[in-house]
Amino acid sequence: MRPYPPIAEHGLIGDLQTCALVSSEGVLDWFCSPRFDSPSVFAGLLDHEHGGYFAITAEAAPGVADGKAGGAGRTGGPGSRAGRPSDGAGVVTRQLYLADTAVLITRFLTREGVGEVVDFMPVHDPHTVTDRHQVVRVLRAVRGSVRFALECRPRFDYGRARHRLALDGALARFEGPGITAHLQALGPLPLEADGDDVRATATLTAGERAAVVLTVCDARSAPPPLLNADDLAEAFSAVRHFWHEWVGHCTYRGRWQQIVNRSAITLKLMTYAPTGAPIAAATMGLPEQEGGERNWDYRYTWIRDASLSVRAMRDLGFTDEANAFRNWLQQRLHDGGAPNGEPLQIMYRVDGDPFLTEEVLGHLTGWRGSAPVRAGNGAAGQLQLDIYGEAVYALAQAGRVDNFMGHDGWRRSAAVLDWLCDHWDRPDEGIWETRGGQKDFTYSRLMCWVALDHGIRQATALARPADVPRWTAARDAILQQIMTRGWSEERRAFVQHYGSDVLDASLLLMPMVDFITPKDPRWLSTLEAMDTELVSDSLVYRYDPAASPDGLRGSEGTFSLCSFLYVYALARAGRVGQARYAFDKMLTYANHVGLFAEEIGPTGEQLGNFPQAFTHLALVAAALALDTELDRATNDTNGTADTADTADAADRPA
């Protein structure tokens, strides 16, 4: 077992209220309970010694570990596909999902046989809040014999709280402050105490199985019922049926069915079902640069990210998920404002709590020494005016918005737009939550325009009460301001903020939100400028921190959200061949099970919190746009531009 595996060498499992990461070596090294944003039970990903982990690995036979048997080394993730050289461990690992489910399978290939660990979290009643969450881990030998090793080392409250072990045969109970973890072993897997932790070893031959079930619950809750093999078989069948039935509602039938389905499942896994609120990522503290300080907590609901996910889910046919978030958003408006005095805060906890006090967990070393590790997020108090555009954009996706939110809901939304007419023209911190001071960010103005534009459309089409003349005047003033102050004649491009020449990839959303047509000369010129400055082999940087200091030390990788938005923009601009080439290249950066983190580093490694919802929703948007434009090009019997575009794609800036 390697400490601190690459960020990308993980799969995600969950039960729609919390989730866990399992490494390509079978190590569960991230799990919080009872919610995504609760303190961790296992956080070995952030501190191997003090964070805790739950490992089930395969051991090489004697003589293999020192290379005498000539076995292949332990590999996993992208390296397993590339055939990484032997490291002497004698075990090769592979990891995959059971198709169209969140059931994760880790395979161990040894000289003596082939074994598997099947990981899943049962989905009982996801819409009912519960303190009880289970992780099921089934061990089996499928060929020959395999020696498995188990270590369960919980570390409650981000590793700050001690626990006591009570071991009774096949049952172990880890008692922490206010929380208890129950571990039940089934089959030939004898548990042994290792201090206040447990370990076990078992050699299984082909056809033999064992299992462990970890149940985490409130310390005051009754112990979980004991399970048998039939119970586990029923649980497996139920979770597989749940995911197959859910994916069956997907309406996408395009060229990238498998990767789009995986992105949809990932977005679903990161949505808190009781409220419908999606989180930005499953983790906290994973760095944008190894050893750097850009380590944030993303286990919360950003108005921006979640609102844009509404379109992705709706376009895939998942209207229930889209409507659930819109209901959550309406409740935030109903609650009557954020602590900073604005109608909305930029992010909340999944239950709508606006208080996300940021603290540094100094006792954790961070992933490969990337400190500080932060819990909570101080950016919650920032002013980011773009959120009003994204919020109204999400609500507008409902079609007849009056049917969706009723008259009272419309009045609340209209009141926000009335307020925005007086407050849109202010400096703010911008979409990227930089800590370098407030500026007049072009993207923030763009999304204020979106808010008013969609409000006007809804009020006019549905004859809703609204001060349409006032909204129209404000909307047009914003457009005029962007076209004059947000446009640089010298760069022939829209820029990050007024008075600068810095480019910003967030403006790739301009054509998506209908601010400008995708073939407008100003937009095509902006796209060409981004090609030259922000794009590196189809990967897109958010902006240049050297040209626009963001108040933080260190650098970052390319931003995968922006890379997929770039594909979208290329496709809509008519550069379809180049767009497909960029999309196909971007897919090569997915991990071994189709997941993306926030960023791609200089040597192709994934960086930042993982997996990242923003990246996956942009992947969906890019795939749908590409399908549409490729179909249009195929059906256009008079056009030959796409053929030429494809032929010289490799020579383009992307």
Image (cartoon, rainbow, N blue to C red):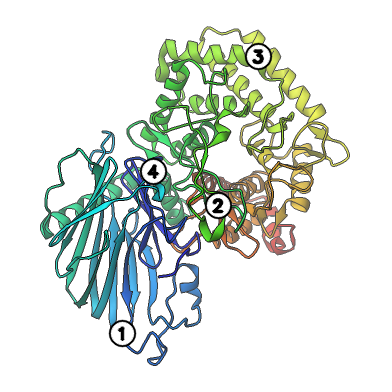
Q: Give the residue number, with chain letter if any, for mark 3.
A: 421
* Whether residue 390 is situated above or below residue 76 in the rendered picture: above
Q: Is residue 73 left or right of residue 460?
A: left
Q: Give the residue number, with chain letter if any, for mark 2.
A: 608
Disc assigned to residue 61: 1
> How many other residues sit within 10 Å of disc 4, few (<14), some (14-19) or many (≥20)?
some
Task: Return the residue found at the far bottom.
Answer: 68
Q: Which amino acid does label 3 sit on?
A: Cys
User: Upstream in the sequence, badge 1 or badge 3?
Assistant: 1
* Whether residue 246 is situated above or below residue 322 in the rendered picture: below
Residue that appears at 51% across and 56% down: 365
User: Upstream in the sequence, badge 4 or badge 1?
Assistant: 4
Where residue 445 appears, as percent x and y from the top left, is 69, 27
Q: Are marks 1 and 2 in contact (CB under 8 Å)?
A: no
Gap in angstroms between the C-alphas marked 4 and 2: 19 Å
Where residue 346 appears, as percent x and y from the top left, is 55, 29
Label 2: which secondary element? loop
Label 4: which secondary element? loop
Q: What residue type is labelled 2?
A: Gly
Residue that appears at 41% across and 14% down: 406
Locate the N terminus by quadrant.
bottom left
Q: Is residue 80 left or right of residue 147?
A: right
Disc assigned to residue 39: 4
User: Upstream in the sequence, badge 2 or badge 3?
Assistant: 3
